[in-house]
Amino acid sequence: MKTRDVAIFTGERFMVPQCIQRIDHLSTHGWQLRYGGTKLYSDHSQDGSGAKKALALATKELLKRIATLPAPSRLRRTPSRKKQSDLPSGISGPIVRQRAGSRVRDCSFAVTLPRFGDTPLARSVYIGTENTYTIERYQEALARAVVLREKAEEAYQRAATKERRAQAKVLKLEMAGLLGK
């Protein structure tokens, strides 16, 4: 997990993990955790003397949340407002094409399958030819496309959570001095 060097208003410097922000505003001084909701860990002092203890508490809570919550995902779960069809996110079509050497056009859905840490895969879900196309076949193909996309999203989420938890273990070792372990 990424960390950065943060200097507070007193000049004291801390190595701070991502998802924790410093708040120094008028009479508010502390560390704000931003992972699975927000929570402020106050210094309980105007001179910044409690900053180290507050950062330790925020980091402990961050590690606890990473261990229990799924990793945040940037996957689009809802269709873009600009999308002109009613199809779910990651599914487009029906795409009509005529393959070389064929006399009949066929239809299919294009499905984008996200993969954590890798480029997404593009898959095609066959609906039928212009001779066999029916509303029922359309709906069955759409259902198959939705299942494909959902399985890929679940795998993506599992992989992202696994990676985030592995990063948290490394962070815990790096921050052992601060955390008192």
Image: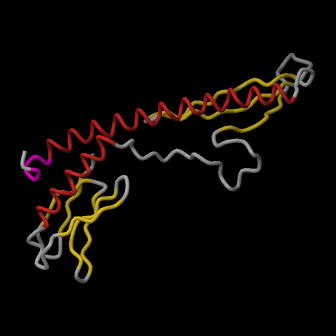
The magenta stretch spans residue 17: no
Image mark count = 0
Which residue shows up at 40% across the image and 33% down it?
A: 159
The residue nearer to you, when weighing 11 against 177, is 177
**Direction from residue 15 to residue 90 in the image, left or right:** right
| Magenta residues, start to end | 175-179
Please tell me which residue is depicted at 42% across the width and 47% down the height of the picture.
Answer: 72
Instruction: Report the front residue among 54 and 90.
Output: 54
Residue 60 locus on image (x, y percent)? 19, 51
User: Image check: 13 left or right of 1?
Assistant: left
Quadrant of res 135 = top right
Residue at 17% x, 57% y is: 57
Q: Is residue 46 above or below residue 132?
A: below
Please identify the residue farthest to the bottom as the structure is shown.
Answer: 26
Residue 86 lies, in percent from the top left, at: 75, 45
Using residue 25 as the reference point, say whether residue 36 is left or right of it: right
Q: Locate residue 86 relative to residue 168 in the image: left or right.
A: right
Q: Residue 102: name its quadrant.
A: top right
